[in-house]
Image (cartoon, helix red, strand yellow):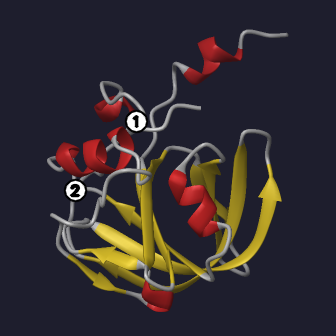
């Protein structure tokens, strides 16, 4: 097998906080595998680890909210990437409002969009969620938090 790790080590890309809700159950996690995948219609895919608490909720959800974090909000990346929703209410101490389907919209994100889940696909240890954007907001300028900015975070729910 080729050494894909050497190729991947050269990459730097935005990281996202993905949130969702089903009924009164809320969940959110830090996601590195995501991107726009269609122009017409506009579609965006996010990949969530099957080991992650958010995966169980997202698998039943109609909507996901995808957030870009400003570079100075490493603390939010740490919260959503370094802790597990199995034993932590990640929304207890952050500002948020309910979005489509009740999915939390983080007030301190640089930008976000809510997407209706169009399809789900098995990708191995992750599930891909193909989203149709239904609501987009951008509140800040500047570069978002990236993968290289968060390499110090130990996964709250390692695969």
Q: Is residue 74 left or right of residue 85?
A: left
Q: Quadrant of the N terminus?
A: top right
Q: Name the spot of residue 22 as percent of width and height, x first.
A: 54, 80
Residue at image point 60% right, 57% down: 55
Q: Which residue is mark 1?
A: 147
* Residue count near mark 2 (Cα–Cα under 10 Å), binned few <14, some 14–19, many ≥20: few
Tag on residue 20?
A: none
Residue 96 appears at what percent x and percent y?
A: 24, 77
Question: Which residue is found at the position 42% from the left and 61% from the top?
Answer: 28
Residue at screen point 32% across, 70% down? 111
Query: Dot 2 corresponds to which residue?
Result: 142
Q: Secondary structure at mark 1?
A: helix
Examine the rendered structure and indicate whether residue 14 appears above or below residue 66: above
N-terminal of the pair, mark 2 or mark 1, is 2
Question: Neighbour class for label 1 at 10 Å: few (<14), some, many (≥20)?
Answer: some
Residue drawn at x 51%, y 21% is 10
Q: Nearer the viewer, mark 2 or mark 1?
A: 1
In the displayed structure image, the side of residue 105 where residue 57 appears, left or right: right
Q: Is residue 50 left or right of residue 84?
A: right
Which percent across, then down, holds residue 69?
28, 56
Callout 2: SS? loop
Residue 159 lies in quadrant: top right
């Amino acid at each position: 097998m080729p050494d894909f790790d050497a190729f991947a080590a050269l990459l730097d890309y935005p990281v996202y906080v993905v949130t969702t809700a089903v009924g009164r159950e809320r969940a959110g996690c830090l996601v590195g595998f995501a991107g726009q995948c269609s122009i017409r219609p506009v579609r965006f895919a996010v990949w969530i680890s099957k080991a992650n608490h958010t995966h169980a909720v997202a698998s039943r959800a109609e909507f996901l909210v995808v957030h870009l974090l400003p570079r100075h909000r490493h603390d939010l990346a740490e919260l959503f990437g370094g802790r597990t929703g199995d034993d932590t209410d990640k929304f207890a101490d952050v500002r948020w409002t309910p979005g489509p389907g009740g999915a939390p919209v983080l007030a301190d994100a640089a930008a976000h969009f809510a997407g209706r889940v169009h399809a789900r696909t098995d990708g191995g240890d992750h599930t891909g969620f193909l989203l149709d954007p239904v609501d987009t907001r951008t509140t800040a300028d500047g570069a978002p938090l990236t993968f290289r900015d968060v390499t110090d975070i130990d996964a709250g729910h390692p695969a």
